[in-house]
Amino acid sequence: MLEFKERLQRQSKRLLVRFSSVYSPLPVKIFKLRKSWGDFVNDYSNISIACDMTFKTYQKYLCPLTNKTKWEYISESLAYANIINFANRLNYRIFKNAYKRYGKKLDMVSVIEGGRKELRNSCKEEKNLHAHIGVELPVGMNTTTFRKIVQECWTDTHWGNFNNKITNIKSRSAYSNYQVKDSLDSLVLPATKVSLSWELQHSR
């Protein structure tokens, strides 16, 4: 997964040089990245549920030194860690000990959008931080039950908010394209899992 992302980033840099004389090269870079990633997820993953999740803006806590109430505000690094925590909770909820002992996981593609420019090369800072997470529907589980589990696992995290949208994915490639509409830098790789690796498929 990491090698695939790095290869796409190297390709995009070559595209920037090639098309540098044709207006702004940025649209070309974004288009190539989005199409490559969308094709990859469409061909090699089983995601079927779109989870558009929000974060709490801040948390109040009592400072032990001053005994005064203080506020901690959500940051991109906190949001990044929260998505990883959500992925861990969800996989454990579905697979129990098989997740801990054997690393069994649902296919999942997680991205961050909005917020401050801490971890990504491009973002829209006027948007509140939120997450777009594509998840595989577990075998034998109906969509209604799974939506409830997703909501519970998200709100059980420290920064997970209640106002979320969980729907069926109509097109994997279109949803994945939408997820990385700014850049592949928005991917949360520790909370992303694709069932069949690119290298494995092309080595056959």
Image (spheres, helix red, strand yellow):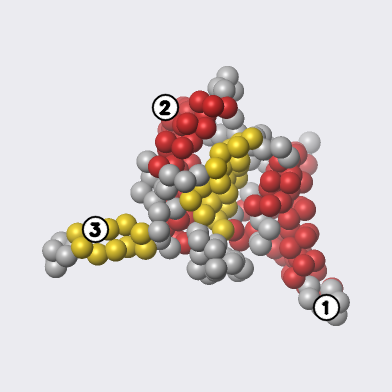
Q: Please report whichever mark, 1 or 3, sits nearer to the chain's N-terminal start.
A: 1
Q: Residues within 10 Å of mark 2 (few under 14, many from 20)?
A: few
Mark 2: amino acid = Asn
Q: Which residue, given by chain and number where applicable, does mark 1 sit on?
A: 23
Mark 3: amino acid = Tyr
Q: Residue furthest top?
A: 140
Comparing 188 with 23, the one in front is: 23
Residue 83, x across and y down, in percent: 47, 49
> What is the secondary structure assignment of the residue under circle 1?
loop
Residue 10, x across and y down, in percent: 72, 65
**Relative to 144, residue 201 above or below:** below
**Residue 132 horizontal side relative to residue 54, left or right:** right
Q: Which residue, given by chain and number where applicable, does mark 2 sit on?
A: 97
> What is the secondary structure assignment of the residue under circle 2?
helix
Q: Residues within 10 Å of mark 3 (few under 14, many from 20)?
A: few
**Residue 53 horizontal side relative to residue 70, left or right:** right
Q: Residue furthest front?
A: 163
Q: Please report whichever mark, 2 or 3, sits nearer to the chain's N-terminal start.
A: 3
Q: Please report whichever mark, 2 or 1, sits nearer to the chain's N-terminal start.
A: 1
**Relative to 132, residue 94 above or below:** above
Name the residue at 83% across, 78% down. Answer: 23
> What is the quadrant of the C terminus in the image?
top right
Q: Is residue 177 visible?
A: yes
Name the residue at 56% across, 39% down. Answer: 166
